[in-house]
Image (cartoon, rainbow, N blue to C red):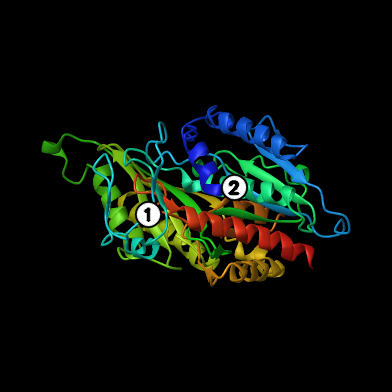
Amino acid sequence: MRAYERLIRYAKIYTTSDPKSETFPSTARQLDLAKLLVEELHQLGVADARVDENGYVYGSIPATPGCEDKPALGLIAHMDTAPDAPGEHVNPILHENYDGSDVVLGGDTVLTVKKFPFLADLKGETLITADGTTLLGADDKAGVAEIMTAVERLLAGNTAHGKVCIGFTPDEEVGHGADRFDIPAFGAEYAYTVDGGDVGGIEYENFNASSATVEIHGFSVHPGDSKDKMINALNVAMEFHAALPAMERPEHTEGREGFYHLCHLNGNITEAKLEYILRDHDADKQQNKKDYLLLVAKRLNDKYGEGTVTVTLEDQYRNMVEQILPHFHLVETAQEAIRRTGLEPVAVPVRGGTDGARLSWMGLPCPNLGTGGFNFHGTAECTTVERMDKATEILLHIVELFAAK
């Protein structure tokens, strides 16, 4: 079975995670795919495939004779889909021999070459989309499908390889994919997440990430008698936000440029709350952003009175590059594998986070590989049959190269 055939099957299983849930996994429906994958792994010959009480799927392929001393390699993808767009009743569509022009889907979704220039590069391939009313779920069911297809080919072929560990996680899209990942039970010394963009991409840098909650405590007085008495929390909130660098917002940044992103603002005259996420690839610059929020709060407290503004900061994840550089052979191996498929590797700094970043800091060095997908988290999401095939080949080459070390 080819990877795209598995994607079509998996995409139809509703696995959207829920950021407001207090359960783990956040939605029981993710277990539907987990159980299917365990059953399929058993059918392929992965005897120890299992799903644990937290919704993680684990399994392994023993090393072939003579390769028992090779480092155990892990392949990881996530089963949930993002709550940013509908993920139920997904109807995948194949556009064979795509002609490189605009694609009109349902639900007012149109993939235009003007808006998405990469479409021109997909000409002649078999494009895969949903019907325009839901996301496709290639993030990250394409990664799941590619790993499963690589597993099938390894078990059916004669390639020498070390131990290969398989892991599928829940709740990556809501930031909890690595929370309960059992690294000792997984059994790998190194791993790759298969959860990136275009095929041939390798990611080993990501944002340092923090959240900031800013609470404004105002003082309400009748507006007819409020001179020199009222402290309007909404106005102070706007003053706080205006003090941040306007050009350091997501809509004005790219590449390794960090940002302050206002996600939520609500309140009234008496109380207001702003919620931010802070991002930067550079740890020192990230710290400067946190310090600057505290400085703005101090200035407003000096102006309006102590306790008017409080800032609560929380670190979320860190740049994996610090953990990958001592094991840079992971990047070099992936680059060689990509070249063996006829592609040129592209190192892309992740403007976000991945399970791999968390896992790397937990002790499992874990760069991220492209799956061949585009436009994740929305109804314009797409991939192609051919790029999924290439992604599968890259995984097989990586396994082969590890056995040759």
Q: Within 10 angstroms of label 1, few (less than 14), some, or many (20 or more) residues? A: some
Q: Residue at x 47, y 50 (%)?
A: 211
Identify which amino acid the numbered label 2 is placed on.
Ala
**Could you say where residue 16 lies in the image, as x and y percent from the top left?**
47, 35
Residue 260, by quadrant, is bottom left
Q: Residue at x 87, y 56 (%)?
A: 68
Question: In the image, is 248 to the left or to the right of 51?
Answer: left
Q: On the rendered image, what quadrant is the N terminus found in?
A: top right
Q: Disc 1 on helix, strand or loop? A: strand
**Could you say where residue 259 lies in the image, as x and y percent from the top left?**
40, 61
Q: Within 10 angstroms of label 2, few (less than 14), some, or many (20 or more) residues? A: many
Question: In the image, is 157 to the left or to the right of 141?
Answer: right
Q: Kindly check if marks 2 and 1 are in contact, taking CB atoms under 8 A apart as contact.
A: no
Q: On the rendered image, what quadrant is the C terminus found in?
A: bottom right
Question: In the image, is 243 to the left or to the right of 72?
Answer: left
**Could you say where residue 262 lies in the image, as x and y percent from the top left?**
35, 51
Q: Earlier in the sequence, mark 2 or mark 1?
A: 2
Rendered position, 317 above or below 219: below
Mark 2 or 1: the one toward you = 2
Q: Can residue 55 be spotted in the picture?
A: yes
**Could you say where residue 165 lies in the image, as x and y percent from the top left?**
73, 48
Please give the label number shown on residue 77: 2
